[in-house]
Image: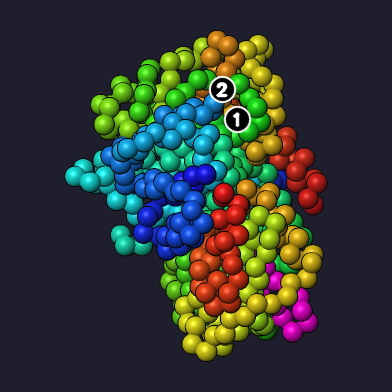
Amino acid sequence: MTIALIGNDQDLATNYLDWLASQRGIETIKLTESGLGSSWSFDLDEGGGEIFLERETVASADLTGALVRFTPEPDLPPALELEADERSFFIGERREALHQFVSLLPCPVANPTSAGRSNSSKPYQMMHLSRRGFRVPDWVASNDADAVRLFVDRHPGGAVYKSISGLRSQVRELDDELLQRLTEGSCPVIVQQLIRGREVRIHTVGDKIFPTEIRCPAVDYRFNSDGATYGVTEVPDAIARRCVDVARQEGLLIAGFDFLVDEEENWWVLEYNPVPSFLPYEMSTGQEIGAALLDELS
Amino acid sequence: MCAATKDGPLALLVGSRGDLLIQAVDRQISCLHLPPDDIVNHRVELDNDTLKLDGRVIDMLLLRCHPQSIIGESFVERDVAFVQGEMRAFMLAACHLETVYAPVMPDAVTWYEGMSWPVWRRTLKDADTALAAFRFGGAQSRGSWVPYRYGGRRLKPGDQLATMLGIATTDDEVAETYLLFEGKALGREAKWLDPDVGRTLREHGIDLAEVAVTEQGAVMSVDVLPNLEPSIADNVATRILERVHDHRTHWQ
């Protein structure tokens, strides 16, 4: 039984899974992005193939699972120096090679690099979540101050704004500063109806769910967790089933769905993340998310 | 930007002014035409129902550019990469709006993987399409090197660099290319092409594509931004406009 840990060996979740595997006596192999061509290489086609390590060769068919966690700014291989344009070409080609490598593995992968890409465009993802039956807060994506003002007028309860892309950005309450910036000329932002309530993060791992409630006075607890409390919570069956279904349809072995639950117990989905940081939720609540993921990979 | 005043649906054409399909569509419909690096300089608005550019509702969006070419060069240097990411995210969502007809409507995977050949290979593999024989990784490579992001063929690099890049190689050659619109070949019979290829591309939001196949009919590559001959461009533009009218009738 061997699990491949692919990508970034500094990643906390990767190291945690590696430790959990060692506790169970499961072998792991580390296939780092920067080590491709120096500490490991591969030869694969659609029928399978081999992974060459420094001291052994592993058939792709012998892997029971793979965990993939990339870093946005990967290193070059040791001792390789390149000019800026060559570096960009090298890193782009190597990343695509790893996408191809992962797609050719015949084992469960958490997560395939192509899975959950909708997270890179919030409006695109919200359209899809809405079509799949989730309740999504009203939104507009615009750089037109007048359009944003009209949107705010329709939502007297308030509005928040954030980046449109998957870039991790702090959610802020809409203010005059944003309107001023839009008036002066800016790229579009996504402005969303403000929902007041408790935050819930639901991690799905295969068919299992791990729901964590976060109560926090700040608009975005990820950036300001002063006074935040975490606890295990209950989830309506329909919501749980929908999360599991979407994750499965998207090819996500693990996913993190973010909700706001208002006073009327309406569950408003905000987004889902294909590379969720599950450790803070596991550590705060004792839910064994990593162990469940290891079960899927072994 | 050009802004014609003909009545009827309004198209947003994103691509080079020299693009023959853009020119052909432009002759037949009211249009707003923008080079891909200029979108961010206009007022844009998108919600669940509507796409607007400078306050005008858009009925059709024709993307004739790679996502990488949507950039924000007019912003200060430190913001360019950020603006690029935001605009790419915006445009992806814009072409998936139900009220907008988009002949090229890439899904998130296709879009964020640059619409390059490996993403089509994976898509067609999932649909059990016959594919040209490739080896991946560079450790035991033979044949020509086909770069993942740029396509084409290059001389294979040395063994060490080949494994560092995890290169893709093939001995297969392109025998025929077919231009597809709505899943069917234009202009001639696609005798070597599996009809499921066109169907699969349509299921993934692609009405217009050029597919290259080997003598055995195995797919070598898919180009969703093909160059078109003038007469073909006019033909495709006419077909696109028929779809725009159908789409508009449905959503009004």
The chain under label 1 reads B
Residue A277 at x, y percent in the picture: 50, 65
Left or right of A30? Residue A178 is: right
Q: Amino acid at mark 1?
A: Lys
Render colour scheme: rainbow
Q: Identify the element where label 2 is drawn.
A: loop
Residue at 51% from the left image edge and 29% from the top image edge:
A48
- Graded by Cα atoms within 10 Å as few (under 14), some (14 to 19) or many (20 or more), the crowding at tag 1 reads some
Q: Are marks 1 and 2 in contact (CB under 8 Å)?
A: yes
- Graded by Cα atoms within 10 Å as few (under 14), some (14 to 19) or many (20 or more), the crowding at tag 2 reads some
Residue B62 at x, y percent in the picture: 58, 41
Q: Which residue is mark 1?
A: B125
Most foreground residue, A181 or B34: A181
State which region is magenta: A256-271
Left or right of A35? Residue A7 is: right
The chain under label 2 reads B
Residue A49 at x, y percent in the picture: 47, 29
Q: Residue furthest front?
A: A25
Alpha-carbon distance for marks 1 and 2? 7 Å
Most foreground residue, B90 or A208: A208
Q: Which residue is mark 2?
A: B131
Q: Which mark is residue B198?
A: none
Give the prevailing secondary structure in the magenta stretch.
Answer: strand
Q: Amino acid at mark 2?
A: Leu
Place residue A210 in its image quadrant: bottom right
Q: Is residue B162 magenta?
A: no
Residue at 27% from the left image edge and 33% from the top image edge:
B161
Residue A11 at x, y percent in the picture: 40, 60
Check the image and report above or below for A30 versus A157.
above
Question: Can residue B205 be seen from the camera position used here?
Answer: yes
